Amino acid sequence: MADVNLLVAGAGGGIVAALRAQELGLSVAVIDANEHFLRANNTSMSTAMIPGAGSRFQREAGVDDSPETFAEDVRRKTKGRANPVVTEALSQISAPLVEWLADSLELPLELVTDFEYPGHTRHRCHTVPGRHGTILLGMLHRVARERGIDVIVPARLVTARHEGDVVIAVTEQPDGTREEISCDALVLATNGFGADPALIAEHTPEIAGAVYHGSEASRGDALRIGRTFDAAVDCIDAYQGHGALSLSGTLVGWATVMHGGFIVNTGGDRFADETQGYSEFAALELTQPDNRAFIIFDQRIHDACLAFEDFRQTKESGVLRQGNSVAELAERLGLPADRLEASFTQAAAGRLGETDRYGRSRWGDVDLVAPFYGVEVRPALFHTQGGLSVDATARVLNGAGAPIAGLYAAGGAAVGISGRGADGYLAGNGLLAALGLAFIAAEDAGRRLGERTAGQ
Ligand SMILES: Cc1cc2nc3c(=O)[nH]c(=O)nc-3n(C[C@H](O)[C@H](O)[C@H](O)COP(=O)(O)OP(=O)(O)OC[C@H]3O[C@@H](n4cnc5c(N)ncnc54)[C@H](O)[C@@H]3O)c2cc1C
């Protein structure tokens, strides 16, 4: 008999697996390598946007959406290169997931309707007040504690093996002490490999020159542990970049662009359609002189973005520059005024309906009005989106495509729904894969355990 039914390695999105499994009557345990996980993992660093397609929050807001529409958006954004099985599973679970977060865990979720994220044809991102991952993760762990689910820290999963019907997980503390926990099901929720420069250079070389702005604990452990089970990997070159990280390390946010702002290089010139997506924009910024870029917006956009904790932190860090005219803003940013003026002219023409030479057609219909703002940004890598192959129930697949008994993967540890490279990433893909696959894994583990017990 195993020590616990379900062991979760990784207390980011993985905590959802423990919460759901416990609701289904399973005994659970959670370990994390980092005792500061509440503020150090990617879930805590996120903007807390969780897609839910066809949710009751959408219906109440008059948004007509469905899992099929979401899956179609994923296919379009990834040019058909996203794993179809995982896309189907996650688009189907997305609305039940956000409703479960609201109803069972009593999270105060709200639908984001004040701007559109690139690639989503519907308003479908749900979030918590403050729109920050620390708030989301704090709420999840508060419920977990209330329900008696504590996280064992610091305990790093270093390896695992089968022994009969159970999985033996080997954990290690920083002093090298090792312990074994046996479980019926092990969920690998240890995120991807963004913090491992060698793996990044090998699998996602185009973004190797960017600043890494994700959890230091994302060291590719799931890949290494999966290998000992002969697990297959999928879409291993997929990643989320970001083109809006300020020099103070805070996120300016793409709402600046989607509300009508634009991005220039050190020459004051625009260089691409900003609305194609923030993920692929990081690699584009890497092609500009000195890898430098500047987001330009106005007071209206500034005020709208104050809804984001990240933007408020950016403002507080003192990196925003303001000008009462384009020339004044150019001077404060160290940009050539005539070129910046020309970029403003392009933006004004775009608002009148002209698709510009970069293909941007979405500007909103409100002109930028002084005072203007600008902030320097640098290209960043946030997290990887490829990982262990999983089926529709989050079970890890081996090289022959068969599920590995008792082994699940969720979040950055597993293949996501972002296709290949950077341009398939849709806002919310990261958290949906993290929370959604964790939820699905718990349900499948519960069902299998129930069947096994019934058969005894
Ligand atoms: C700045 C930023 C903003 C983002 N915004 C969004 C957003 O709005 N919406 C969205 O969908 N996605 C967003 N993402 C992506 C999203 O944060 C991630 O895709 C998601 O949080 C991954 O969840 P996870 O559970 O896989 O990993 P994590 O949340 O990083 O959790 C993994 C945990 O595993 C632990 N761990 C690692 N190795 C081991 C081991 N061997 N043993 C035990 N524990 C281990 C780590 O300490 C960590 O706590 C953002 C990312 C960043 C960096």
Image (cartoon, rainbow, N blue to C red):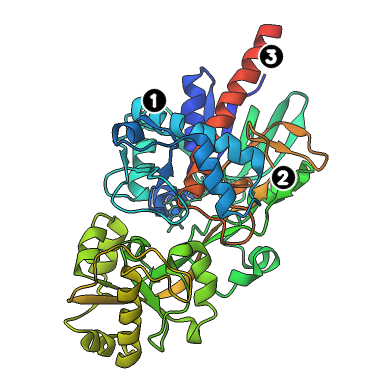
Residue at 31%, 69% (x, y): give it: 351
* The one of 398 and 61 positioned closer to us in this rendering: 61
Residue 137, above or below 448: below
Return the residue at label 3: 452
The amino acid marked with disc number 3 is Arg
Q: Is residue 330 left or right of residue 92?
A: left
Return the residue at label 2: 226
Label 2 neighbour load within 10 Å: few <14, some 14-19, many 20+ = many
Label 1 neighbour load within 10 Å: few <14, some 14-19, many 20+ = few
Of pointers 2 and 3, the one earlier in the residue sequence = 2
Give how far across and how far down residue 367 sits, in percent: 24, 70
Give how far across and how far down residue 292 sits, in percent: 44, 81
Tell me, yes or no, if residue 416 can be seen here: yes
Residue 55's image quarter? top left
Give how far across and how far down residue 53 sits, in percent: 45, 37
What is the spatial separation of the Cα atoms under label 2 and label 3, in whole angstroms?
A: 25 Å
* Beta carbon at label 3 within 8 Å of ligand 1: no
The amino acid marked with disc number 2 is Gly
Residue 3's image quarter? top right
